[in-house]
């Protein structure tokens, strides 16, 4: 019988305007807050104004660090850590896509531990990270309900995550209105990330009875908005469903981790500047073909939940949403496969994933 435990300590608050309505919860986390955002979207989405209103209503003092870049680097989180050490907040409130949410987690550690950003990868800290509140403005990473922070290391020439259980945000506010202004390309890219978490989680070696429930529900929800994603016309119901599906994806990978799709996708982002979700989407068709050899019933389940007839149709939909793969040389294919093969993500994938298997997946994609 399978042994597993289920741990999801984040209070998830779903609904419109709940950040303002439930501002009292913030007061329980302290009287000084560092807001962490990217350069423009937190403001443009309306989430920053709501956060400021919520903090002000509770008499919570705040400062803003709004310098988070996409696919944040260790240098970028170092700057945020500096800001936090000066201001000495009691908690962090991150607003944005996965990038600001992941930086919030890094800052939560750096604020109270005198370490260099690269030491985050040790996954062990003397002092407990500050509490985090997460407000997603994309529907993709699920970072608002995961203990992971994915950072870009120029020394390692890749993206790599660090994690401790205390990095699960204390509260996640899911308000679809903050995703309303997302341009179609970012909507699709991030939706592909959410789908990849759900599917990779369901196909992972570490899938459990409870992660399966989350993945199934998430894939079915996501599927209800597939037509809108393809048509490029998203209604509020679609935005809301995708946001919830994304959070279910985050909860899923909090238990299963991700698999080879993420391991290979990181090189496509690092070397070819592809957005994270798009990189995953481009690899998903081949990934499903690979898994059909190992867990055929699970692949059949995924296709059925998505309402797609076979892997060819799935691959076609992924290409339609993600666009085209950059041209890779034979050398690049070998190099990215060699980089991915040693990762935990690959270890969580079904079957025996050798460099040759990864080269084939990347080459065929
Ligand atoms: P992102 O890098 O956070 O943001 C991408 C772009 O979207 C930015 O230009 C951002 O603008 C803009 N944007 C965000 N919200 C918007 C809105 N509501 N309206 C208009 N524009 C908006 O994208 P992401 O895909 O959400 O996050 C990707 C990162 O998360 C990657 O580093 C990935 O590795 C990581 N990730 C983490 C986890 C995890 O569990 N922690 C899981 C998967 C992926 P601004 O710069 O102005 O904000
Ligand atoms: Fe991801």
Image (spheres, rainbow, N blue to C red):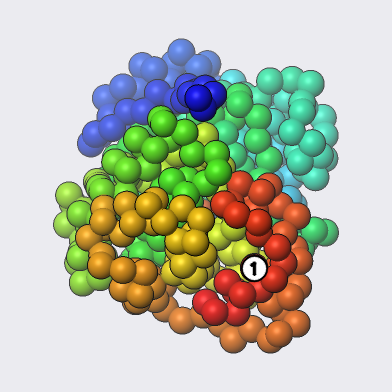
Tell me where residue 127 appears, x and y as whole percent.
74, 20
User: Observer-nearest residue: 39 or 314?
Assistant: 314
User: Where 213 sits versus 201, above or below?
Assistant: above
Q: Residue at x 79, y 36 (%)?
A: 122
Q: Residue at x 59, y 30 (%)?
A: 167
User: Observer-nearest residue: 183 or 57?
Assistant: 183
User: In the image, is 176 to the left or to the right of 189?
Assistant: left
Identify the element where label 1 is drawn: helix
User: Where 327 sits versus 14, above or below?
Assistant: below
Tell me where residue 161 appears, x and y as whole percent.
66, 46
User: Where 191 sits versus 142, above or below?
Assistant: below
Q: Residue at x 66, y 49 (%)?
A: 347
Q: Residue at x 33, y 57 (%)?
A: 300
Which of the 4 image quadrants contains residue 153? bottom right
Question: To which residue does mark 1 refer?
Answer: 357
User: In the image, is 188 to the left or to the right of 279?
Assistant: left
Tell me where residue 356 appears, x and y as whole percent.
69, 71
């Amino acid at each position: 019988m399978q042994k597993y435990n289920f741990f999801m300590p984040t209070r998830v608050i779903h609904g419109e305007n709940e950040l303002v309505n439930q501002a009292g919860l913030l007061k329980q986390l302290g009287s000084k807050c560092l807001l962490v955002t990217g350069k423009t979207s937190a403001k443009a989405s309306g989430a920053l104004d709501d956060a400021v209103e919520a903090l002000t209503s509770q008499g919570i003092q705040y400062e803003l660090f709004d310098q988070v870049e996409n696919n944040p680097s260790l240098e970028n989180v170092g700057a945020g850590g500096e800001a936090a050490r000066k201001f000495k907040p009691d908690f962090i409130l991150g607003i944005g896509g996965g990038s600001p949410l992941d930086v919030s987690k890094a800052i939560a550690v750096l604020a109270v531990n005198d370490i260099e950003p690269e030491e985050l990868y040790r996954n062990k800290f003397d002092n407990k990270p500050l509490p985090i509140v997460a407000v997603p403005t994309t529907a993709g990473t699920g970072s608002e309900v995961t203990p992971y922070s994915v950072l870009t290391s120029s020394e390692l020439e890749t993206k790599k995550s660090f994690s401790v259980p205390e990095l699960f945000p204390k509260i996640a506010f899911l308000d679809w209105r903050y995703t309303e202004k997302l341009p179609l390309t970012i909507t699709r890219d991030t939706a592909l990330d959410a789908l990849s978490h759900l599917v990779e989680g369901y196909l992972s070696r570490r899938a459990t009875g409870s992660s399966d429930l989350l993945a199934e529900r998430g894939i079915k929800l996501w599927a209800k908005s597939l037509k809108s994603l393809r048509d490029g016309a998203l209604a509020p119901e679609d935005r809301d469903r995708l946001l919830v599906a994304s959070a279910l994806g985050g909860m899923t990978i909090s238990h299963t981790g991700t698999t080879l799709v993420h391991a290979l996708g990181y090189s496509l982002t690092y070397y070819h500047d592809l957005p994270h979700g798009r990189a995953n989407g481009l690899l998903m068709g081949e990934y499903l073909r690979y898994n059909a050899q190992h867990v055929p019933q699970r692949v059949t389940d995924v296709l059925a939940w998505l309402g797609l007839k076979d892997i060819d149709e799935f691959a076609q939909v992924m290409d339609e949403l993600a666009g085209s793969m950059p041209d890779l040389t034979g050398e690049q294919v070998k190099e990215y496969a060699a980089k991915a093969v040693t990762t935990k993500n690959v270890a969580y994938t079904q079957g025996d994933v050798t460099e040759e298997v990864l080269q084939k997946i990347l080459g065929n994609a």
